Image (cartoon, rainbow, N blue to C red):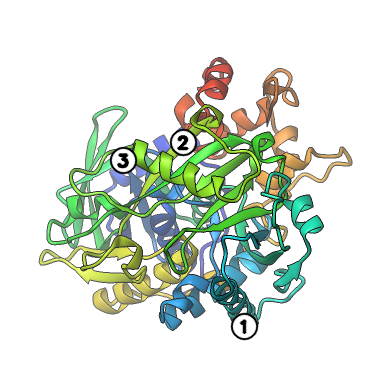
Amino acid sequence: MNPAPLKDSALNRERRGAELEALADGKPVDVLVIGGGITGTGIALDAATRGLRVVLVEKHDLAFGTSRWSSKLVHGGLRYLATGNVGIARRSAIERGILMTRNAPHLVSAMPQLVPLLPGMNRASRALVRVGFVAGDGLRRLAGTSVATLPRSRRIDAARAVQLAPTVRRDGLDGAFLAYDGQLIDDARLVTAVARTAAQHGATVLTRVSAQAAQGDSVHLVDELTGDSVDVRARAVINASGVWAGEVDPSIRLRPSRGTHLVFDAAAFGNPTAALTIPIPGELNRFVFAMPEQLGRVYLGLTDEDAPGPIPDVPQPTPAEVSFLLDTVNTALDTALTQSDVRGSYAGLRPLIESGGHTADVSREHAVTESPNGVISVIGGKLTEYRYMAEDVLDRAVALRGLASGRCRTRNLPLVGAPANPVATLRESVEMPSSLVARYGAEAPNVIARATCDRPAERVAEGIDVLRAEFEYAVSHEGALTAEDILDRRTRIGLVAADRERAETVAAEFV
């Protein structure tokens, strides 16, 4: 089956209205995907590029759930290798390489990870970390990722360690181990890029549309903005709603695990250029990371705690988790951080498959299931493997439903913003701010050139390196419908309450 001609990748209110209206024609679609996180958008992209007619619906906004609450890392699978999960470790390293070199080289870069060698770290622990990093180098080679993309691990001296992480404890510092992993500029931006690329290939992507009474061949859709509804017939219905999967298919049993992060001004860590990586006392293969991030911030994470009970729309960190993160990072700092240094925080729920033991030890493998009424669900898994998970569930759906489909094409498919993506990019001689290029890649010139607002190159607030044109682009091209969409997902300004307050009025101008 030949793929359809490329379309405009822009998602906006006008396109949403037209595509909702088109669904009323009663014609069946090939695939209907429930859930607008990284897994759901990945499935929509895979289906569209196979030449299938696909509709994705999301009750809230793109990346509303777990997909915006991650560590912003594209893991190479080292931790899973250490616990004997060779398959998931190898796949993670392969998928990391695909993202960094083919799918999204504009959104994923090499992040230095620094493990300081302090007096409290005994010889056995040092040997374990070093062996782990060497194994990580082996995974990188096995995945075919070059050292130009991910440098080799090595030991560095104390002076170099202090350069990379200026607030590291210096008393007794015996250098550090330095390794590299993949880091996203932002997880929600990856979701948006995948969704727009799906739309570019013909997918219908609808936010603020809830799926009700899902069956294997039909779903009742409700427009959350107007209350209008429509029944859509589909040859395959795929549930990719993450921690809410059980609401679509009650037979699914998940065991959510909460991962919490704290947000700091980068200055509190001396404006580091490497992620300070601190072993958790008494634990093997578990670390706390203080990671330099966009907008002049450092994210400190993360926890791994059982989160039973009802699934909240926005999970909240607990005081115990905040204390745990501060206590752990302070073992490696010259000057202790306190709660007064914390600018913001966030928590996400991992959709782990129910099993025994501590959540930190539960497999991150995904599973594809079929409910008694025919809904196909994909559950579990991890962000790094979203593309592989999408391929797996689409292969299953094609086989189960006899869909006339081409083969998966996503392994070598550049997302919107990647230099090789054919989306039209306006080439201008004007130098772009580095922060704009980091978030938009090859699309950065379009953000400015296509702006119609006043003062497009002006920052939305003093000290926040987000331009007014970016707020407009979020609405005109990235599907943002509300100020919250702009502040909390298209940009991450909303992670710090004080920054949100300063930018709210500007965001309101564009919706």
Task: Say which of 262 and 497 sits in front.
Answer: 262
Identity of the amino acid at label 2?
Ser
Mark 3 and mark 1 lie on one chain; the one further toward the N terminus is 3
Identity of the amino acid at label 1?
Gly
Q: Residue tagged by mark 3?
A: 59
Distance (Cα) linking label 2 and label 3: 24 Å
Circle 2 or circle 3, nearest the eye: 2
Image quadrant of residue 138? bottom right
Left or right of 95 on screen, residue 450: right
Label 1: few (<14), some or many (≥20) within 10 Å? some
Left or right of 245 on screen, residue 335: right
Q: Which mark is residue 20?
A: none
Give the residue at x 66% y 40%: 269
Give the residue at x 49% y 31%: 339
Q: Residue tagged by mark 2?
A: 345
Image quadrant of residue 298? top right
Distance (Cα) linking label 3 and label 1: 42 Å
From the viewer's perspective, is residue 263 above or below residue 250?
above
Circle 1: element type: helix
Circle 2: element type: strand
From the viewer's perspective, is residue 180 above or below residue 396?
above
Looking at this rendering, what residue extends furthest in the top direction? 505
Mark 1 and mark 2 lie on one chain; the one further toward the N terminus is 1
Mark 2 and mark 3 lie on one chain; the one further toward the N terminus is 3
Q: Residue tagged by mark 1?
A: 138
From the viewer's perspective, is residue 271 above or below residue 225?
below
Q: Is residue 26 visible?
A: yes
